[in-house]
Amino acid sequence: MIEARHFIVRGTVQGVGFRPFVARLASIHSLKGWVLNANRGVEIHVEGPRAALDAFATAIQVDAPAAANVVSVDAVATAHSGLDRFVIRDSEPSAMPTVRIAPDLPACEDCLEEMRNDRARRFEYPYINCTNCGPRFSVVTSLPYDRERTTMAPWPLCSVCSSEYLDPRDRRFHAEPVACPACGPQYSLVEGATQHWGRAAVGRTAELLQSGAIVAIKGIGGYHLSCDARNRVAVRELRTRKYRKSRPFAVMTSDVAVARSLVCMTPATEAVVTSRARPIVLVPARQSLPGVADNYRELGVMLPYAPIHHLLFGAGAPDVLVMTSGNRSSEPIAYRDDDARIRLDGIADAFLVGERPIARRVDDSVIRMSRSGPVVLRRARGYAPDVTARLPAPMPILAVGADLKNTVTLVVDGDAIVSQHVGDLEHLSAAQAFRATVHDLVSMYGLHWSELVVAHDQHPQFATTAYAHELRPHSRIPVQHHRAHIASVLAERDALDKPVLGVSCDGTGYGDDGSIWGCEFLVGSVQGGFARAASLRPFLLPGGDAAARSPVQAAAGALSAVAGLPDLTARPFCFPQTFIHATLLATKRIRTFSCTSAGRLFDAAAALLGFTQNVEYEGQAAEWLEQLAWRATSTTPLAFRVTGAHIDAEPALAEIIARRLAGENMALIARAFHDGFGTAVAEMSLQLCARNGIDTVVLSGGTFQNTLLLDVVKARLAGKVATWTNAAVPPNDGGISLGQAAVASVAQVRVPARGGNSVRPPE
């Protein structure tokens, strides 16, 4: 007896070969019907015997393509129409899309083998792909995901590609970016007035890299600046041209064997390096590459993921290449060809340019390995825009994030979609990229500003706050910075009603009292709100935000209450005159603020141990202090005082000075600082958990990027309470937008007058 069923499959099911999979599945079970990409996901109509329909329904979830993520399958019985075959129908956009967009995928082994086969049609073709691999997020222009709504639309399929596209037995069956040398885009090398095309372009690029040149290479989500990582002259020249004095470069190795020779690969590390996301992974180095990551114990390594990378290594490019974002320091990555030629002029000696446009910039993701697993530092290519949480949001939410390490979160139909990394919005080009990212996401899902709930940081002077107030949404919800950090972890774990102790440690955040917070112990839940239970004992911050750029200035404030200070401008400290000026500001309370910032405390400790220059990028001094500490084994922790509602750092700072004057090894002192601070955080956490009947501690905030500190705190808490940290989004401000969205999803939103309403979330 013939029956019919209609399925709606939700999740990451477009751009991952799901429709071809369904078509093959229908053929296996001798079912008739159709499948199409819809705004809600994938819709399927099938007709056949009940047993075959049951088997089909099970296989949809059990045997789904590896790149798919099936979240739900809704099925209803319907009338059968006597269909005589199974077809893939064209998609038609209609109502607001809710489908998940797939992240970009690395070239699969089948395509790489074909690309290396000199008898294959796509021999050495740099845009080879199939349903199992290739670009997704970086090429889609609107939903649903079909070729005409990608940047491949200008290249009609040739007859051979078209037959592959329409053949259910072919792995390119309905692969939207499919192309070949006869009908698809090409690569060219622009070297001064000379232009090379195709294989000649790849070969010449490999020669240039071997000779020490710097080449701008167009990849999946933007341009890289590349040079031979073993050529110290080329690396030094790249630093000079890019205005990047000391921040480490990432490298791409030709294969995993070369990566193993450079860094200490554990099975867990190798699993991340070779994963489908192909991120940059920070791993302890085995050997030094002068100029690449000097004074860092770790090296950022990644494997080739785009066909053009494999072609370059196959053509003789050096087996280890610096692959850094195509920009000048602090700017967003260049992804449009004309913009890249302007912005990278004077940095790159030549440009390897692909004809396929990139729909949006997508940086490389960055993962750091800790003893307890991977820590996401930058979430972009390979991960974005995967859904990171399900939130109880009756209305769409736009969370605009923080001003540093900005990301944006859009909640549609309960799915929290976190954007790719945008950057630090203090730079004009990054601020422009932020606006473009917001508009891109909102327009992609067909939303209107008036139907959005907009969540933003509580800081009145943040660029993101100002932007939120430019909009005319349904309502606006300010969310305190440190509560957002903790909420991001609970959102990931679908635990919005779970009572926890949240420990949020970072540089600065706007507190409830208008002061600068940065080391906060918060008791409560996202559902019920968080109360501030303890913090770092407040200390002075002369110059306010300016102190974030000057560790010596931060030290002047942190040391202002320490008695019996020696002359810190003398040896061994050698503080510059900035310290004297900042001390006067603190003494006279001129442009001086109270803060509880863990970040500024780490800066002060770094200054006492020798980092007395201004930072080149946010967090540099704390990074330097951690790298110094890794050179020593565990030692006697510094004495932080844990009392009532405060962790007092004054005794620890006085001890650093005393040990330094006694000539103790600076690495040992740095390790003692980490051990001491981590022990104090754990001790305060256990006291507050016992006092409030709580069994779970949540750790988040940029300070917990520091894997040494994270390991110390987790070790002290092990066996006493559960410890939760971020897994899908960064603990730094890159996770703030998800936390904002989580708080906004449970806040009571009043219906406002046009132009928006400000609603304070629960405390």
Image: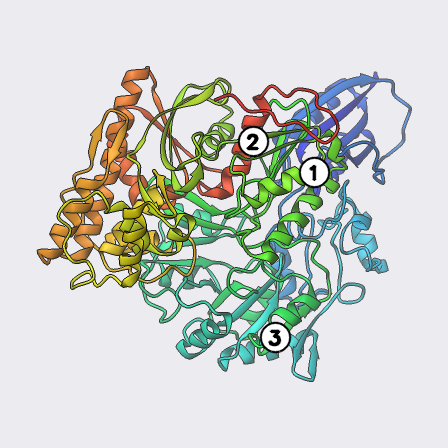
Label 1 vs label 3, nearer the camera? 1
Question: Horizontally, is 666 left or right of 748 in the view?
Answer: left
* Amino acid type indicated by mark 3: Asp
The answer to which quarter of the image holds residue 85 is top right
Q: Please name the residue shown 28% across and 59% down the image.
A: 611
Question: Horizontally, is 284 left or right of 310 in the view?
Answer: left
Question: Mark 1 highlights which residue?
Answer: 471
Q: Which of marks 2 and 3 is nearer the N terminus?
A: 3
* Amino acid type indicated by mark 2: Pro
The answer to which quarter of the image holds residue 549 is bottom left
Q: Do the residues labelled 1 and 3 touch (CB within 8 Å)?
A: no
Residue 345 circle label: 3
Mark 1: secondary structure: loop
Q: Position of residue 305 (x, y in %)?
A: 56, 57
Question: Mark 2 highlights which residue?
Answer: 478
- Extreme residue toward the front, this view: 588
Residue 256 appearing in the image? yes
Label 2 vs label 3, nearer the camera? 2
The Cα atoms of the two marked residues, 2 and 3, are separated by: 42 Å
How crowded pointer 3 is (Cα within 10 Å; few <14, some 14-19, many 20+) is rated as some
